[in-house]
């Protein structure tokens, strides 16, 4: 629930956002005392900072939002994305898992979770997450490629090759997919 004051502040920055004036919108949010007491305002400040590439500051605002409202699903998700961007999987995975526990079903969340699990060499868990990502984003080539990589690591090469055929058809100019395909074929003799 957003209060009237919070709603008013958020509405007041909409024209700035529409004009691409992210820094001005951020300054207006940070100047308000609500940024310290409102999860919604802290979250929006974090979003703008993330867009501006101010990753450390975005994380601080998402954490502030979670201190105010611990079950703020989107703040958990975005904090996970911040940590993922920094390749800090020790912090990214718990944030993404919290978002999912709170009801996030977005393919991007599952995809990031899968990527992190793969990074930690947890291939069976990564495979499950990639498959869940494909449920809501079935056309995502990234999730299919990730699934194929997991299948390769799990020595399920025929499945991996079948999926890579789809990936290569979708992105025929991406050399890395041909290399993965060749690697799998070599392992199969």
Image: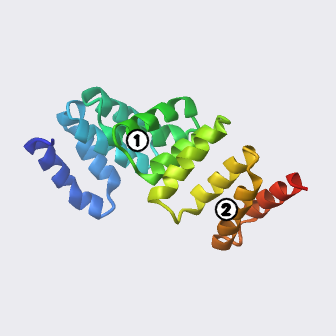
Q: In this view, does 169 lie above or below 188?
A: below
Q: In this view, does 114 lie above or below 134?
A: above
Q: Can residue 57 be seen in this view?
A: no
Q: How much space separates mark 2 and mark 1, taking CA atoms?
A: 28 Å
Judged from the image, the secondary structure of the residue bearing numbered disc 2 is: helix
Residue at image location 36% in from the left, 36% down from the top? 62
Q: How many marks?
A: 2
**Percent of width and height locating residue 13:** 22, 53
Pick the residue in front: 182 or 16: 182
Residue at image location 52% in from the left, 66% down from the top? 139
Residue under circle 1? 77
How many residues crowd mark 1 within 10 Å: few (<14), some (14–19), many (20+)? many
**Percent of width and height locating residue 60:** 39, 32
Quadrant of residue 121 within the rendered picture:
top right
Circles 2 and 1: CB distance less than 8 Å?
Answer: no
**Percent of width and height locating residue 75:** 35, 39
Query: Colour scheme of this structure image?
Result: rainbow
Q: In this view, does 149 lie above or below 119?
A: below
Residue 18 numbered mark, or none:
none
Residue 163 numbered mark, or none:
2
Residue at image location 23% in from the left, 30% down from the top? 36
Is 94 displayed left or right of 7 in the figure? right
Q: Nearer the viewer, mark 2 or mark 1?
A: 2
In the picture, which quadrant includes the N terminus?
Answer: top left
Judged from the image, the secondary structure of the residue bearing numbered disc 1 is: helix
Pick the residue in front: 171 or 46: 171
Is 87 displayed left or right of 174 in the figure? left
Pick the residue in front: 44 or 118: 118
Mark toward the start of the polypeptide (2 vs 1): 1
């Amino acid at each position: 629930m957003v209060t009237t004051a919070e709603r008013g502040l958020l509405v007041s920055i909409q024209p700035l956002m529409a004009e691409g004036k992210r820094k001005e919108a951020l300054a207006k949010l940070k100047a308000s005392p609500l940024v310290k007491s409102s999860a919604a305002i802290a979250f929006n400040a974090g979003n703008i900072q993330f867009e501006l590439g101010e990753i450390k500051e975005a994380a601080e605002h998402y954490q502030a939002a979670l201190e105010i409202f611990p079950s703020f699903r989107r703040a958990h998700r975005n904090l996970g994305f911040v940590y993922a961007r920094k390749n800090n999987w020790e912090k990214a995975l718990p944030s993404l898992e919290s978002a999912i526990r709170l009801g996030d079903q977005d393919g991007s969340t599952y995809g990031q979770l899968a990527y992190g699990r793969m990074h930690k060499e947890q291939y069976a868990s990564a495979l499950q997450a990639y498959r869940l990502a494909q449920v809501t984003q079935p056309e995502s080539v990234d999730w299919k490629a990730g699934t194929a990589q997991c299948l390769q690591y799990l020595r399920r090469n025929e499945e991996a090759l079948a999926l890579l055929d789809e990936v290569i058809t979708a992105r025929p100019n991406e050399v890395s997919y041909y290399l993965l395909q060749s690697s799998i074929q070599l392992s199969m003799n």
